[in-house]
Image: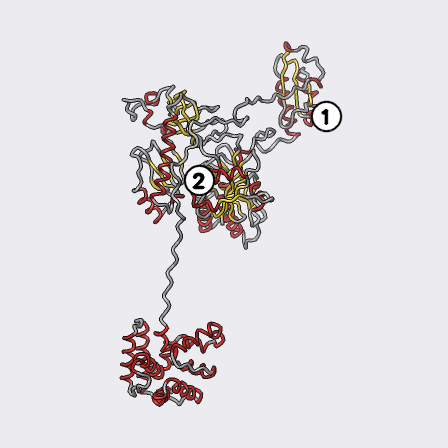
Amino acid sequence: MKRMLINATQAEELRVAIVDGQNLYDIDIEQPSKEQKKSNIYKGKITRLEPSLEAAFVEYGADRHGFLPLKEISRDYYQSGVDHNKAGLKELLREGQEVVVQVDKEERGNKGAALTTFISLAGRYMVLMPNSPTAGGVSRRIEGEDRAELKKAMDALTIPDDMGVIIRTAGVGRDAEELQWDLDYLLQVWKSVAEAALTKPAPFLIYQESRLIIRALRDYMRPDVGEILVDTEEMYAEAREFVEQVMPHNLRKLKHYTDDVPLFNRFQIESQIENAYEREVRLPSGGALVIDQTEALTAVDVNSARATKGGDIEETAFNTNLEAAEEVARQMRLRDLGGLVVIDFIDMSSNKHQREVENRLQHALRQDRARVQVGRISRFGLLEMSRQRLRPSLGESSQLVCPRCEGHGRMRSVESLSLSILRVAEEHAMKENTGQVLVQAPTEIANYLLNEKRRALSEIEKRHDAPIVIVADEQLHTPHYEVTRIRENEMGEETNRPSYHRGTPRKLPTHALTKAHLNIPATPAVTNVKPAQPAPLREPREAAPEPQAAAPVSSVVAPTHSIGVVERIMRFFRGSQPDTAGSDKQDRASRGRGERTDRGERNERNDRGDRNGQRRGKGARDGGRRDDSRRGNGQAGASAPAAASDKPNGRSGKQGRQKQPKPQAADERAAAGTERGQQAETQPKPPPPAAWREAGEGRGRSHAGSRSGTGRRGRGAHG
């Protein structure tokens, strides 16, 4: 069972995790100090038009201007009377024009946010696109009968002509009433946004996307999530309010976690979250994944490491790659790695194994909410794929670039860096009018230069007639250093100072104080839009139980069971002699399955009554006719004599069956037994054993005294 865990005990982070048992399925972390801009709606102003990029730069209230491509601009903003097929960017738009935009991608590095004028409002079951009349339909993830049912439900919705609607995967199994309720709510939100956009000039925030806890309940709440645990009272109240309004049938799943053990430690996922920050991820078989993020792509290297369980190198590579395919899909979901991803699998010579690894990766990616495109494994063992970026990745939102290595991950050794400084110092000393070369370096670099490279420094000074001053600066750390050339006309009081006073303090960059640092986000113009009425209350649909086959009528199969020879022997040894078929059924029911097991093969033959009747030939035929005749003519009196010939008995059996209908298959089996019995009459039979004869006589006497002779003759023929 999947669970949704919401941890808000620390004010700096709000964490929402989806777990399957004790396996971390997905994680989302929100920091209140960092303002979430994705999906927010702003009123902005075009500040610059760039025909070379076919895009406009929009001031919408952030530090950097947003990037608005021409293809993301609705025709409603084009200048009237201009042919949009022939006109250029500056003819369609003008600088200073106000537009309503939505953030499509967050700011990354030096890039501003990507904007669009095609607004989309996400609801519980659908996404409303107010200015995209041609877009809409059912999510591509929904297939088969569910897709056909949702299309029928969409036909019953009242959708404005100039708007589009896309049904989300959460809408599977919902009827038209529930979908219409969600549509009415989104129309209400859009009306509020449109009215607020006309209240004041740009730029300002119109509508802010919901908080993480609301987005998680809206986007991740599926029927397979059986429990929602919230560990703070405030968040529990917020979640309960949302669930009561939007999905009241899931209210029973929402619970307040009050145990002393931390929520994430209870389900043992803290270590799994920490692994999502690591560069190397271990595989169960001993292999490893090495994940490196660059500016343009994410590189994933699959290493066999300690994986040695395979029979040969091909099998080891194949098994490791299968594990790696599943783990890569999981890590991309946890870290939200977007853009181009290149996976370097272990080389496999078998094309069949390559196809199986590709299929395993595609199967694991089906659980991902992001759009994914997967290529094929090339002859170099590389697989290329792209993944939609749903939110800032785990590394971007909670990690900083290392200030020492500046993101390289590696540093030069002391010897290599010292030689590099020595060469740079000589290059400055070679220039004309050089009065002095000042080298400010970390302590270990300065010690190496002054001791191991003292002779090389002396030779440079003599050769170029320029003194070199080495200053050990405690505030510098490898690989940082500074080499400064001082001209002769710049020599003065500063150069006459002692060297230990010439260590320049590090100039730290100044970061301007913003509202984000004070955790005071801008207040959106549209807030607290609630549905006009609560969601329709309806329990989720459950699969109808399979219809059980009707129990067979005991009176139909009683004749073949009640008069079988093996049955007579068993009853003889048990000492029970029921007089009627009803008592015979009660006797079998009282003994149950245990007695049938103890009797073994003999009683199994008794349960297969029809086949026993076919083997016993005429005896089974006569016995069946006696019992059928007794049931069919029981109303005429028990003392009625049984017919001596075969044909009257056969007719009486048929008459009894006509009075009480019998399945067709049973009639065919009875007819087959009768034919075999008639064939058996023409062949001589050996005399029956004494025990069989005595049992038959006792059984005949128990049925009816007037028919005992007939019963003995029938048994004699059977023997």
Q: Is residue 457 above or below residue 566?
A: above
Q: Which residue is mark 1?
A: 451
Q: Residue at point 40% right, 48% down?
A: 539
* Viewer-side residue, 420 vs 12: 12
Location of residue 4 in the rendering, given as x and y in whole percent from the top left corner: 50, 44
Res 714 → quadrant: bottom left
Res 710 → quadrant: bottom left
Q: Quick check: can you spot residue 431?
A: yes
| Distance CA(mark 2)–CA(mark 1) | 67 Å
Under circle 2, the secondary element is: helix
10 Å neighbourhood of mark 2: few (<14), some, or many (≥20)?
A: many
Location of residue 292 in the rendering, given as x and y in whole percent from the top left corner: 53, 37
Q: Nearer the viewer, mark 2 or mark 1?
A: 2
Under circle 1, the secondary element is: helix
Q: Is residue 564 above or below residue 354?
A: below
Say which mark, if any, is on residue 164.
none
Q: Is residue 49 left or right of residue 451?
A: left
Earlier sequence position, callout 2 versus callout 1: 2
Q: Amino acid at mark 1?
A: Asn
Location of residue 121 in the rendering, given as x and y in whole percent from the top left corner: 39, 34
Q: Quick check: can you spot residue 354?
A: no
Res 554 → quadrant: bottom left
Q: Amino acid at mark 2?
A: Arg
Q: Which residue is mark 2?
A: 218
